[in-house]
Image: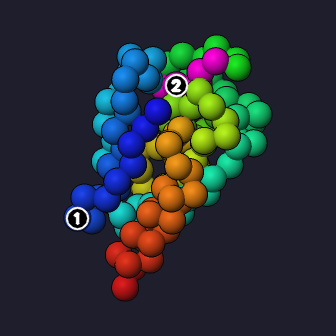
């Protein structure tokens, strides 16, 4: 699971627990101007993942780490699809961050509010 919060003008994603081991990351920091938006999307886990490099993918158990598909790099950390949030990025190493959070709706609201505020 991931903890998502805003620190000044930066979106911070902290990977928690053993997911750090599977995802091979513990923290991601993205400047808010590079965040395009966020959506809660339980169906995203049914999409093709692409090539895993590095990370873990056990269908129905966990998808974590960096995946490459259609020329894009996507970061995953999801065990429970019902709690998946997709964060779209621009001009970053990753095109999307797909993470499991405790409260998807609150996380989407947090991200959307922060990028709206940073754009003004």
Provide residue 97's location: percent of width, then percent of height. 51, 44
Q: Residue 44: which quarter of the image? A: top right
**Residue at horizontal 67 percent and vertical 29 percent from the top:** 49
Direction from residue 55 to residue 41 in the image, left or right: right
**Residue at horizontal 60 percent and vertical 41 percent from the top:** 83
Direction from residue 107 to residue 82 in the image, left or right: right
Provide residue 55's location: percent of width, then percent of height. 49, 19
Provide residue 29's location: percent of width, then percent of height. 31, 48
Q: Which mark is residue 8?
A: 1
**Residue at horizontal 75 percent and vertical 42 percent from the top:** 43
Disc 2 and disc 1 in contact, CB within 8 angstroms: no
Q: Residue furthest left?
A: 8
Q: In which quadrant is the C terminus drawn?
A: bottom left
Measure how far apart labels 2 and 1 are at the Cα level. Answer: 27 Å
Direction from residue 46 to residue 50 in the image, left or right: left
Task: Pick the residue in front: 80 or 120.
Answer: 80
Q: How many marks?
A: 2
The residue carrying pointer 2 sits among few (fewer than 14), some (14 to 19) or many (20 or more) residues within 10 Å by Cα, namely many
Task: Pick the residue in front: 80 or 91.
Answer: 80
Residue under label 2, please give it.
64
User: Which mark is first along the chain, 1 or 2?
Assistant: 1
Q: Is residue 70 magenta?
A: no
**What segment is highlighted magenta in the picture?**
61-66
């Amino acid at each position: 699971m991931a903890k998502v919060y805003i620190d000044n003008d930066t979106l911070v994603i902290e990977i928690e627990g053993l997911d750090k081991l599977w995802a091979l990351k513990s923290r991601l920091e993205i400047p808010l101007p590079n965040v395009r938006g966020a959506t809660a999307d339980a169906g995203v886990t049914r999409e093709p993942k692409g090539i895993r490099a590095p990370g873990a993918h056990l269908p129905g158990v966990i998808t974590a780490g960096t995946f490459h598909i259609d020329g894009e790099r996507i970061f995953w950390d999801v065990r429970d699809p019902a709690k998946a949030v997709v964060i779209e990025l621009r001009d970053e190493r990753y095109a999307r961050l797909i993470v499991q959070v405790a409260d998807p709706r609150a996380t989407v609201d947090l991200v959307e509010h922060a990028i709206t505020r940073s754009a003004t």
